[in-house]
Every structure is written in structure tokens, then in C-alpha cells.
Image (spheres, grey):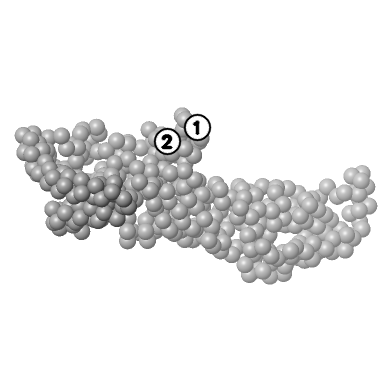
Amino acid sequence: MNRFDGGIFLENIEWFDESGKELVRRLPQQGSGEIKFGAQLTVRESQAAVFFYKGKACDCFGPGRHTLKTWNLPLITKLLSIPWRGDSPLRAEVYMANLKYFPGLKWGTQNPVAFRDSELGLIRLRAHGIYNIQIAQPVLFINSLVGTMGKMDTNAISDYLKLVIVSRFNDYLGETLDTIFNLPGTFDHLSEELEKRLAGDFARFGLRLTHIYITSVTPPDEVQSAIDDKGRMSLITDMKKFMQLKAAMAMEKASEAQGEAGAGLGMGMGMLLPGMFNASLSSPEKTATSDEKSISTCPDCDNQIPGDARFCPLCGHQQLLLLQCSNCGKNLTPKARFCSKCGKPAEMKKQPVVCLKCNTENLPDSMYCNQCGSNLG
């Protein structure tokens, strides 16, 4: 709710945000007006007022009651503005900025983004969270984002801020995280570092990012199933007994089938499954002996590894040479921006990137498209 009492009398200007979502409101709302000399402006503790006169930001007012000074005089201005049909050319308006915290704004990936996991390979991830913002510089915010609009709320800028957060999060996750198995227990640290990276992006428009939280980072359903299977396999200590148990459960289910066909199926499964499981248990030993013929040494830790391995199982050193650190000589992964051993920066993109697939313009240093998830390399 806003109050702007005009006419031939002096104005009382004040503003109340009933929705709780408005960042800025212009008074008078219909456009610039003839704010008269001596008009009273009331600003609350959680507000700031920017006074525009003759198209320029003349002053910014804090909490309290203020007297506005213009050349619009009651009655006299109406007579002098007859050549302009009684409409004074001395235009003036007040922009009221809401300085309170705006909490609980949501961010998240519209489409899954690609992530190269050291254990699972190339997978797609979805991430979601919330963040809080506050207007830190009212004049900069009004001149850079609001312009001449009558009002602006959080819905008007949330889409843009969401794209900025997702872009910075994608790059940061690719630089620091090795595998999604290391995600549990790191959300607080990821949030703190992401907030530092985004501080400059928000400050450019007079905003302050007070807090950002990561609520979830989830892979696709098939990857989650593979993770669950890996967890169940780690609980099995005797594979032979486990296979015998599975065979017994299969025979029990087959015997529950009705009719002679079910009974015959149960008997057949009971005769075939033990031999199949014994063969599956004995076959890895034969293949293991054949793989022992090609053995190589890791150049980073001198560990003996299979000749066709792409990564050392002991230290994770990449065996396929695509890019090498100029400082320590460690092999780097494709599109790596920092060396995982010495931390020195690799070659970085400095110009904004346009996706060749969907023609979407991305922020500088982006590695993956925010719209379609395509690799921008």
C-alpha cells in the first residue's frame, strides 16, 4: 500500500509493502508527478528513499521524516504551467527501496547438467537450493535494474539470479568435486565457497547475497540404482553363500507357481541354477590371469596397474595424456581449469560463450550450457 496525497495541497509520501515481495516501488505510481515544495516524505527503518528531480537522482534518504524541496509551488505552478496544459515540466518522483531480507528464494537446474565422475564416468546431475538477498545500494539497484518501472518484486529478477547461481555452481562443482560419493557432509562447505564466488555477481547490481543453501544434488534414477547396488555389494562378505541364497529364493518363488508347469519350472531351476552360479564364480579367476600379462607402472606413485587402465586405482592419476600441468607435469583431465596436484590454474576461457546447439548466451568461464546442458568446449 502506498500513500501519495496530491492535488493543490502538499503531499504526504509513504509506502507499505503488504505482499512482502516488492523490492522497489515508485511514487507516484502512475509516473513522475508534480511533487510540491515542502512535501513530507516518511521513511521506515527497513526502507530507503531515492528522490529523482528533473530526471536525476538528487538524494537518498534514510529512516525519518524529510521535507522535499522542488520548484513546484501550490497554485502558482499551475498558473505558470498553462503552456504545458497545466502539467508542470518540473517532474519529480520518489523510489522507495525495501531493505529487508528476502529469504527462501529458490534456485535449481532446469535441465540436468553434465558432470565427469571419476568412478561413474560422465553422468548428469540435478541441484536445488534456496538463497536470501538484500538491497545493499539502492541507487545502483534502481539505475541498473529497475529503470523507469513502477515497481519490481522478487519474481522479476529471480529467473536471472537463478541462471547466475547455476552457472557458478556447475563450474565450482566440476573444479572441486572428484566423485558424487564424496558429497555427503560437504554441503555446508560447498555453500560457503559458492557464496563467495557469487558475491561479485550480485554486488554488480547493488544486491547482497546473504546466504545460499544447497538442499540436494541428485543423479538420474539409473545412477542411483547403481549406487544402491554398490552399497549392497559392499555388505556381502561371502559371494558363494549369497549366490546359494539367491538360488534357494528363486526355487521357492518357482514352487509357489500354480499347476504342473510351475512345479516343473521349480525343479528345472533347482537343477540349473547351482551350476550357473558355480561357473560365474569360477570365471573371474581365469580372466584375471589373462589380464596379468599387460602390467604398467603409474608415473605418479609407481604403483603396478593394468596396462589398459585409464586411472591409477591407488592415487587416481590419469594415464591417458591429454593435457599436462606446466608447473608440476601432472596429467590433467579434458577441460580442467586447475591442476589437482599443485592447484595452479590451467588455460581459462575469458570471453562469454554461446552454445552452438541452442544459441543460448552463457556467462564467462561457463563449461556447460545452462539451457540444454551441452558441453561448451
Residue at 72%, 67% (x, y): give it.
42
Marks 1 and 2, how far apart at CA: 9 Å
Question: Taking the image as drawn, is residue 298 in sight?
Answer: yes
Which residue extends farthest top?
356
Tell which of 261 and 49 is nearer to you. 261
Question: Taking the image as drawn, is residue 246 in sight?
Answer: no
* Amino acid type, mark 2: Ser
Instruction: Tell me if label 1 and label 2 are in contact, CB under 8 Å.
Output: yes
Tell which of 342 and 11 is nearer to you. 342
Task: Please name the residue that numbered disc 1 is placed on.
Answer: 358
Secondary element at image label 1: loop
Q: Tell me, for residue 374, which label it has, or none.
A: 2
- x then y, percent, for residue 265: 25, 47
Residue at 59%, 50% (x, y): give it.
157
Residue at 41%, 56% (x, y): give it.
216
* Amino acid type, mark 1: Cys
